[in-house]
Image: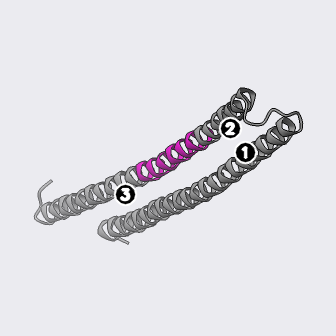
């Protein structure tokens, strides 16, 4: 086997290696994007669940306030205090605490929603950054392959020139 044959075999192996490396990079980028999409779907599911829990908590709190108000009306009526300032004060206090509780529930839901959206964005950014990095590596691999091809061609040409020079009696 001559020099040219070995050089071409070496170049062929380099081509095969580059193709395999770039395929692996593309596959890992696709896997990262698929993972990110799965995470984003999970975060959407968690947000929907969080919204449902908050709605249930609000509903429970409204029912509790209604029960408290009804109990207060009954207690005041039994004691002859219906329509008094005490009734208005108690009703206002029940409403005030109900409002605070509903605001707290909604605030917690909003903060949780914002946190999940932030995690979604971070997941997407990680996948995109990973895929871009892999793309840069793949381009670098192709540049290395082109350089190897040029180097192999130059070596083959130099070997041919030396062989011709020897045949013609030169050094």
The answer to which image quadrant residue 79 occupies is: top right
- Contact (Cβ within 8 Å) of mark 2 with mark 1: yes
Q: Is residue 100 magenta?
A: no
- Contact (Cβ within 8 Å) of mark 3 with mark 2: no
Q: Residue at x 79, y 40 (%)?
A: 73
Q: Is residue 124 magenta?
A: yes
Q: Answer with left or right where residue 48 lies relative to residue 75.
A: left
Determine the CA span between mark 2 and mark 1: 7 Å
Badge 3 marks a residue whose secondary structure is helix
First in sequence, mark 3 or 2: give its number: 2
Residue identifier under label 1: 61
Residue identifier under label 3: 138
> In which quadrant is the N terminus drawn?
bottom left
Residue 88, image x, y percentages: 69, 32
The main secondary structure of the magenta stretch is helix
Bounds of the magenta segment:
108-130
Label 3 crowding class (10 Å Cα cut-off): few <14, some 14-19, many 20+? many
Nearer to us of marks 1 and 3 is 1
The answer to which image quadrant residue 105 occupies is: top right
Taking depth in this image into account, of 113 and 53 the one nearest to the observer is 53
Badge 1 marks a residue whose secondary structure is helix
Badge 2 marks a residue whose secondary structure is helix
Residue 139, image x, y percentages: 31, 56
Q: Residue at x 58, y 54 (%)?
A: 43
Nearer to us of marks 3 and 2 is 2
Q: Answer with left or right where residue 38 lies relative to residue 26.
A: right
Residue 95, image x, y percentages: 66, 36
Q: Which mark is residue 98?
A: 2
Position of 89 relative to 2 (above/below): above
Residue 97, image x, y percentages: 69, 32
Q: Residue at x 33, y 69 (%)?
A: 8
């Amino acid at each position: 086997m001559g020099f040219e044959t070995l050089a071409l075999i070496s170049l062929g192996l380099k081509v095969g290696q580059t193709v395999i490396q770039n395929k692996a990079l593309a596959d890992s980028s696709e896997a990262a994007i698929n993972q990110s999409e799965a995470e984003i779907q999970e975060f959407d599911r968690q947000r929907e669940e969080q919204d449902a829990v908050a709605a249930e908590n609000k509903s429970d709190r409204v029912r509790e306030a209604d029960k408290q108000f009804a109990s207060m009306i009954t207690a005041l009526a039994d004691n002859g205090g219906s329509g008094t300032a005490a009734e208005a004060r108690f009703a206002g206090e029940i409403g005030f605490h109900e409002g605070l509780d509903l605001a707290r529930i909604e605030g917690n839901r909003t903060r949780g929603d914002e946190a999940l959206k932030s995690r979604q964005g971070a997941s997407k950014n990680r996948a995109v950054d990973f895929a871009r990095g892999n793309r840069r590596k793949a381009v670098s691999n192709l540049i290395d392959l082109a350089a190897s091809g040029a180097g192999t061609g130059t070596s083959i040409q130099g070997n041919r020139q030396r062989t011709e020079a020897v045949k013609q009696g030169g050094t």
